[in-house]
Image: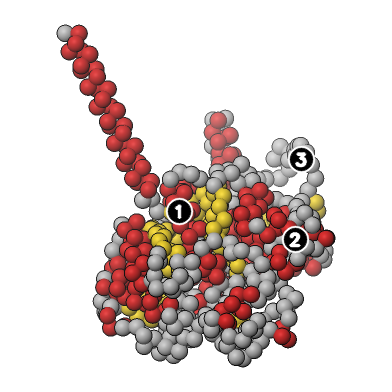
Amino acid sequence: MVEQDTMLRLLKQVTAELHETRQRLEEREASDAEPIAIVGVGCRYPGGIVSPETLWDLVSEGRDVVGDFPDDRGWDLENLFDDEPGAPGKCYARRGAFLDGAADFDNGFFGISPREALAMDPQQRVLLETAWETFEHAGIDPTTLRGSRTGLYVGVPPADYGQRRGEADDVEGFMLTGNTCSVASGRIAYVFGLEGPVTSVDTACSSALVALHQAVRALRAGECTMALAGGVTVMAGPGIFLEFSRQRGLAKDGRCKSFSDDADGTGWSEGAGLFLVERLSDARRNGHRVLAVVRGTAVNSDGASNGMTAPNGPSQQRVIRAALADAGLSTADVDVVEAHGTGTALGDPIEAQAVIATYGQGHTWERPLLLGSVKSNIGHAQGAAGGASVIKAIMALKHGVVPASLNISEPSSHVDWDAGAVELVTESTPWPQVPRPRRIGVSSFGISGTNVHMILEQAPTDRADEADGPEEARPADGTRVEDTPAEDATAVPVPLLVSAKSEDALRAGAARVRDHIAAHPDVPLRDTAFSLLNTRAQLDFRGVVVAGDHASALGGLDALQSASPHPAAVTGTAGPARLAVVFGGQGSQRVGMGRELYECFPVFAGAFDRVVGLLGGDVV
């Protein structure tokens, strides 16, 4: 009998352990396949592109940003050009796409001395500023992330800035950290206090997408709670132009003619694109707005192809199929592909054939896969190219429109376009009507042979994800400020807080808030006020405009911007935290005192109701 009881107890124990093991396996499998939410975006690209919206304006209007070489970087422009391709030390392309003010940097904002800032590769400077903007775009005060398990994966090409500066005595001791790729990511972690995995990535043109792939994998593995990922490229010197001129790989007019029959080479560009990502379940729990969802990713290599820098079609097909498998989707489940599309006579046909051999077989000519590339608008931004592709994809998913790819005279005659249902998008096209979320594939291929493909999906349409921008951020419980009862919501005065680390920056910040309010007259002021107060860092120099409508808000912000007096605007500096006690009287000063607060502000009304309830009374 004792042996029987022992056996029964052991069987129960084994059964319980098996159940727990199966449960853990199921949880791990679910975690390995969990969609990853993109909750914030920051970017800098040529043509004044500083946000997803400004990039969308560019592509939706069918414009490009190709222009003259910059004259503020110390390049010897008088001796740089030669119309003869391959001329030693010369460039036959006279146009490209370049960041405005690439040397500008608010070093004091990040606590960096002028000498150290001078030694820093511009790529590090742009990354720091874009990282701050990405956190704020997600509705997160960057100063609250210190000590968090936030990961960082950044594509950074080797810096040529240090070589151009040489051994300058004025920055001696800072050149190593200022120009080392590993420090580009490490410096962000240091400034923001991030304690998750931190990695710099260099796979050439696919760096940004490889970094995002690594962030997705790290989140699914539980290595970090959220991650910042993307890529950057700033050309401190013209070396990449000289190299590709020697190889005859440049478009003379600086424009990428992606998949066009007259494609004659790539057009170099630069920029930065960063994304804040977290598990979809965490984004929902944290009340973060979801911009798009990463359903699947894959990375592979060309291996021993017909040349170290030559694309490999079969490898590109394999990486597409691997990404689809990771997402649990078929080729028919994806509507659009945002292609690498560099505009070279060799690479474009290989990529097009890979897309036709995969996606083209899962579509019909009644609903073909749509194909395009943002490089036709902004050029090839190298390590930041994948970032621009993902931003365009996010915005296309949101708006339900596939923008035109530019510079296509005729589809490349080197591609058998009849072999599969794939259509080049040469004019703005409504997204195909599908009975499911919209989906888009994004490709990025490096000259190193590293290929990436990623499947993005339209953001969920549940209530918590409806907001269109950081101005509509809300508490973790999902409450929307504009849902609160009020007879005339626009008439309720609200404080619009602007803060900065200097008076000049405060004025610039006021100008940005003013421009935002002017451009979004349909957004309630209370939403903007809520976000400025709750999702931005509260810095020392502060200005407040108290306004009940858009006109008065614009007037007060104009005054802040110009440092002019205004009855609704106040400025000052924050000092050490001190205790303040306010006695508002007993309510006997006038009948109905507090009623306006009660009717307009639900937090006040809720607290009042609770107190009255505790006292056994009724609100009248």
Q: 578 and 479: which one is in front?
A: 578
Q: Which element type, helix, strand or loop, lies under badge 3?
A: loop
- Residue at image mark 1: 216
Q: Residues within 10 Å of mark 2 (few under 14, many from 20)?
A: many
Q: Residue at x 58, y 85 (%)?
A: 86
Q: Residue at x 54, y 75 (%)?
A: 380
Dividing the picture into quarters, in which one does residue 236 lie? Answer: bottom right
Q: What separation in Å lies between label 2 and label 1 (alpha carbons)?
A: 33 Å
Q: What separation in Å lies between label 2 and label 3 (alpha carbons)?
A: 36 Å
- Residue at image mark 3: 577
Q: Which element type, helix, strand or loop, lies under badge 2?
A: helix
Left or right of 19? Residue 504 is right
Is 566 rendered above or below residue 533? below
Q: Position of residue 347 (x, y in %)?
A: 43, 77
- Residue at image mark 2: 119
Dividing the picture into quarters, in which one does residue 568 lie? Answer: bottom right
Tag 3 near tag 1, CB within 8 Å? no
Q: Earlier in the sequence, mark 2 or mark 3?
A: 2
Is 377 rendered above or below residue 122? below
Q: What separation in Å lies between label 3 and label 1 (alpha carbons)?
A: 40 Å
Q: Earlier in the sequence, mark 2 or mark 1?
A: 2
Q: Position of residue 547 (x, y in %)?
A: 69, 60
Q: Residue at x 62, y 58 (%)?
A: 181
Is 573 rendered above or below residue 207? above
